[in-house]
Amino acid sequence: MSHALKQVFNKDKTFRPKRKFEPGTQRFELHKKAQASLNAGLDLKVAVQLPPGEEQNDWVAVHVVDFFNRINLIYGTISDYCTEQSCPVMSGGPKYEYRWQDEHKYRKPTALSAPQYMNLLMDWIEVQINNEDIFPTNVGTPFPKNFLPVVKKILSRLFRVFVHVYIHHFDRITQMGSEAHVNTCYKHFYYFVKEFSLIDTKELEPLKEMTSRMCH
């Protein structure tokens, strides 16, 4: 592993603690199955497909947590360069500005700096995926009716991290030699959300040209 790639996986650079799957649980087995597909070098388009006999919500839950961990890691590697000064607005180029809204402090969409937005976003996702009422960990506990709407919101917001990183910080990713790793993570994410129709096409617009080159 190159020094640059080691930096990507450096635990100190992880934005926050990873959400882990408990060994022995069905979710842990699914996580292993998903990882095995990736490690075997399977075509990513094939790797994201629901394995026979598995529940779609379980498969989606495993991937949401995994993408959260991976995208955290990617943002963690450039977070020192994403500051109030360099990124006073959470954006993806001049055409796209992302405003933050939640059920607590920011009830109306609010313009924030990129680091503020990222912190609120990662905190918010962490609360969702650790909420047993939304992401039940016990086998047999049904997923709630609002599971997919919450998942769609999580994934569309995580996509915005890719948008910001690719458009504003890709020079840093390239300097670190992490381009191939980030591109693979993006392709995996993109094929997954397309396979299960989890992000509106209009949300994907900012990276449309890059995606058409990268994901055939």
Image (tube, rainbow, N blue to C red):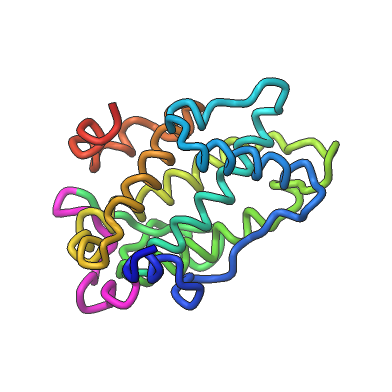
Q: Position of residue 94 (x, y in %)?
A: 14, 54
Please name the residue shown 40% across and 68% down the image: 6
The answer to which quarter of the image holds residue 165 is: bottom left
Q: Nearer the viewer, residue 63 or 126?
A: 63
Q: Nearer the viewer, residue 168 or 157?
A: 168
Q: Position of residue 2 (x, y in %)?
A: 34, 65
Viewport quadrant of the C terminus: top left
Please name the residue shown 39% across and 32% down the image: 200
Please name the residue shown 26% across and 67% down the image: 176
The answer to which quarter of the image holds residue 7 is: bottom left
Q: Is residue 104 left or right of residue 106?
A: right
Q: Main secondary structure of the magenta part?
A: loop
- Give the answer, above or below, for where 189 lies relative to 98: above
Toward the left, the furthest residue is 94
Q: Is residue 93 magenta?
A: yes
Q: Position of residue 24 (x, y in %)?
A: 82, 49
Toward the top, the furthest residue is 52
Toward the front, the furthest residue is 1
Q: Position of residue 130 (x, y in %)?
A: 68, 58
- Give the answer, above or below, for where 36 lies relative to 53: below
Q: Is residue 115 left or right of residue 138?
A: left
- Give the answer, above or below, for where 33 lies relative to 180: above
Question: For the image shown, how many numbered marks are present on the structure?
Answer: 0
Q: Is residue 29 magenta?
A: no
Q: Which residues are magenta?
A: 79-95
Please name the residue shown 46% across and 72% down the image: 10
Viewport quadrant of the N terminus: bottom left
